[in-house]
Image (tube, grey):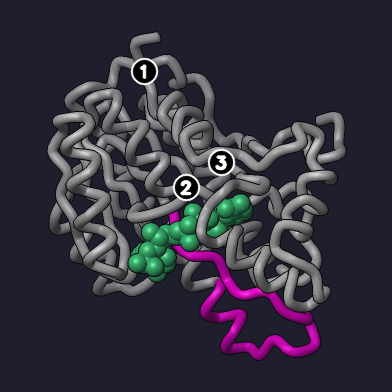
Amino acid sequence: MELGISGKKAIVCAASKGLGRGCAEALAGEGVDLVICARGEETLEATALAIRKNTGVEVRTVACDVTTEVGRESLLAACPDPDILINNAGGPPPGEFKDFTLDDWRKAVEANMLSPIALTQSVVYSMMERGFGRIVNITSAAVKAPINLLDLSNGARMGLTGGVAIVARNASRHNVTINGLLPGTFETDRLRQNLAKNAEVRNITPEQAAADRISMIPARRFGKTEEFGAICAFLCSVHAGYLTAQNIVVDGGAFPGAL
Ligand code: NAP
């Protein structure tokens, strides 16, 4: 299917690795020019080089922390009027509710709620004026079913989901959509780190920890970043203008609810 977005401009946040990179690659594959960011410059440049080589699109890089005001300003300076915005950042650390400080909560809210809200506010009105815009918030399956030990993520991401629910509806008459894309368990560095930690705590091998996790997923495997990117690209396509204010779980069937 031709997605109809060739020549559009996208900001993809936190895109040197993992899910963000998957989205950047899928958009580039559709001919979308990119501005991508991450904090680590070396990996970011290597990713940009690989995407340029594979797709021929323009890929500009901004090495920054997207959870800071300065970082977001530099990103917007590189691309003030994106047609597509993919909001993403690292997730908050796991832990016990009793141990979290207010500062931990503030950091999580800043990174996973306020940062995507600020970027959305900066670009959504000019998208509405131009009559096209696609915003995808990479959140987590935790938005539908809170995850044990991830209270910080559960809370901040639900805040983001509620925070954009009305602007998503108001923007839709201008052909601007805002959706959440909710990953379950995808093969990324973050997952590998989580499995290593899980294995250490349980005194088992990382392979056993992975097998245990997979046994809880109906698809009996982890998701691939390419699969996540393809869904993201479709949400950004000209065909998805009537699909807005939704929170789409991509988890191999792990969410147990029927709706
Ligand atoms: P990942 O493989 O560790 O990749 C994270 C990417 O984000 C890297 O490019 C990293 O580069 C960049 N990044 C992190 N913090 C940043 C910041 N403050 N500013 C700019 N760039 C930043 O992680 P992932 O698995 O793709 O996860 C992406 C998001 O999805 C996270 O919020 C995660 O919690 C969430 N999620 C993932 C899964 C999963 O199964 N993988 C499931 C549910 C939710 P630098 O470190 O160089 O900045």
Q: Look at the image and give the residue range highlighted in magenta.
A: 88-108
Sequence-first tag of 3 and 2: 2
Q: How far apart are marks 1 and 3 (CA)?
A: 17 Å
In the picture of the structure, the residue carrying the numbered disc 2 is 19
- Mark toward the start of the polypeptide (1 vs 3): 3
**Residue at the top extreme?**
1
Q: Where is residue 130 in the image (x, y as percent from the top left)?
A: 22, 30
Task: Note whether ligand 1 is within 8 Å of mark 1.
Answer: no
Q: What amino acid is found at the position of numbered circle 2 in the picture?
A: Leu
Whether 1 is among the magenta residues is: no
State which quadrant residue 214 falls in.
top right
Tell me which amino acid carries mark 1: Val
The residue under label 3 is 181
Q: Mark 1 points at which residue?
A: 238
Query: Where is residue 137 shown, x and y percent of the image?
Result: 49, 47
In the image, residue 183 sits, relative to residue 218, either above or below, namely below
* Distance CA(mark 3)–CA(mark 2): 10 Å
- Residue at position x 32%, y 71% in the image: 65
Residue 17 lies left or right of residue 199; in this view the side is left
Quick check: marks 2 and 1 in contact, CB under 8 Å?
no
Q: Position of residue 92 (x, y in %)?
A: 58, 71
